[in-house]
Image (cartoon, rainbow, N blue to C red):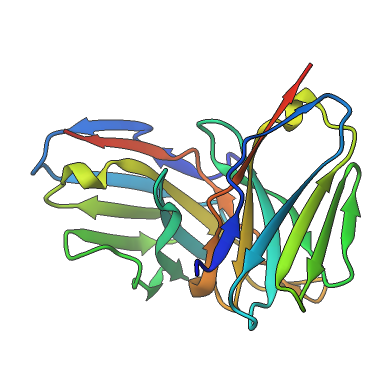
Amino acid sequence: DAGVIQSPRHEVTEMGQEVTLRCKPISGHDYLFWYRQTMMRGLELLIYFNNNVPIDDSGMPEDRFSAKMPNASFSTLKIQPSEPRDSAVYFCASSPGGWDRGFVEETQYFGPGTRLLVL
Amino acid sequence: RKEVEQDPGPFNVPEGATVAFNCTYSNSASQSFFWYRQDCRKEPKLLMSVYSSGNEDGRFTAQLNRASQYISLLIRDSKLSDSATYLCVVNQGGYSTLTFGKGTMLLVSP
């Protein structure tokens, strides 16, 4: 398997522009997560989906952020309008969910991330 | 108090040394625990889960102390390739409560 795929890998944009980040999870994984990582705040969960349905978006910073998962193999995270404080690395991760050997299979597999710089 | 706290380091050790990291968590209802490893400018990857009885994977040993609410990671015979940031992850039950620490940086020198 190719693992979790994210695009673009790097994005530089100007304040006020719309930014769209893309993610393809590992095939067969039921859970998809979007994270943001900064030096100050570390890794923060923004939103996660189960079987394409958003389950918890309480980590989304504000209305400028939105995420969709139209099918099992694709998700987007959109920022509109973008601001300099949105500069960070955005990771997408997927997880099989379910049970394995008596434990919930919680292992999350991260994509390579998108490095976003908003000027 | 932060939910998951780690010493940011860096821990500088020579090859072959033994090094240990601790991580404390604030919520006593936390149910599962993990160590992830993140190389510079890369994504986090699961290193190992932490079980109540403690567990070992080669040179790596993880321990859980529920009474004192901390987990530890011990690395024996450090290799240059162990240089990375080690993230402590705590789950209170359910993906919404998966909390990552900010990580401890390890630098292994020749």
Residue A116 coordinates in the image, percent (x, y): 30, 37
Q: Quadrant of the N terminus of chain A?
A: top right
Look at 34% across and 73% down and name the residue there.
A58
Look at 65% across and 59% down and name the residue there.
A107
Left or right: B69 with respect to A96?
right
Quarter residue A17 falls in: top left
Q: Going by the picture, which residue comes out furthest to the left?
A: A16
Q: Quadrant of the C terminus of chain A?
A: top left
Look at 86% across and 38% down and name the residue there.
B18
Quarter residue A69 falls in: bottom left
Question: In the rendered view, would you say B95 is above or below B76?
Answer: below
Left or right: B72 with respect to A82?
right
Q: Going by the picture, which residue comes out furthest to the bottom?
A: B29
Q: Exactly how many numbered labels are in the figure? A: 0
Question: In the rendered view, would you say B98 is above or below A19?
Answer: below
Whether residue A108 is visible: yes
Question: In the rendered view, would you say B68 is above or below A10?
Answer: below
Left or right: A101 with respect to B90?
right
Front residue of A84 and B67: B67
Residue A63 coordinates in the image, percent (x, y): 17, 65
Whether residue A28 is visible: no
Residue B32 coordinates in the image, percent (x, y): 69, 71
Look at 44% across and 47% down and name the residue there.
A91
Front residue of B66 and A51: B66
